[in-house]
Amino acid sequence: MKTLTKAIAITTLTLSSIGIASASNVMVPADNYVTSKLCVVASEGNKTKLSKAIKKTGLSKNYVAANVKCNELDIVAFIEQYGTNVEKMNNYLTSGKYNNDTNVANVASR
């Protein structure tokens, strides 16, 4: 009986530690500004969700790419640093002008 209890305890601890190790960082907006919410959505890496969020704000995609700041970074740099699906998200925001080789996106030239 002791062996079974030990085996169950070890299995439970192992599975618990796997869950903790795979837990991801969760972004939470610090305020209720629409731009803060856009930053959080952009960092999640879901292009469809970001597109819907931008439409909901009434801002254009070009305006967001050129003017929205997240933690004092432009949104493209913010996604590079904190986001997932970086290339896909930044190509969407910059209309395919994102260059991940040099980490430069020319969004001001539009």
Image: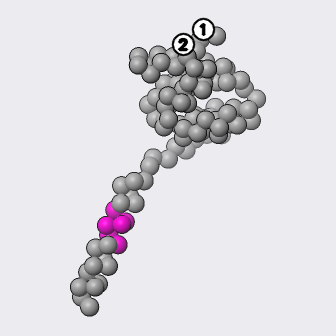
Q: Residue at x 44, y 22 (%)?
A: 100
In the shown orientation, is residue 12 left or right of residue 69?
A: left
User: Mark 1 = which residue?
Assistant: 109
Asked if the residue under mark 1 is in contact with the one under mark 2, i.e. CB atoms within 8 Å, the reply is: yes
Q: How far apart are marks 2 and 1 (CA)?
A: 6 Å
The majority secondary structure of the magenta stretch comes to helix
Residue 8 appears anywhere in the view: yes
Pointer 1: residues within 10 angstroms few (<14), some, or many (20+)? few
> Which amino acid lies under the numbered mark 2 shown in the image of this protein?
Asn
> Which amino acid lies under the numbered mark 1 shown in the image of this protein?
Ser
Range shown magenta: 12-17
Q: What element carries label 1?
A: loop
Residue 41's spot in the image, x, y percent? 59, 39
User: Mark 2 = which residue?
Assistant: 106
Residue 14's spot in the image, x, y percent? 31, 67
* Quadrant the N terminus occupies: bottom left
Does residue 15 show up magenta in the picture?
yes
In the shown orientation, is residue 84 left or right of residue 56?
A: left
Q: Which residue ends up furthest to the top in the rendered image?
A: 109
Q: Is mark 2 on a helix, strand or loop?
A: loop
Residue 78 appears anywhere in the view: no
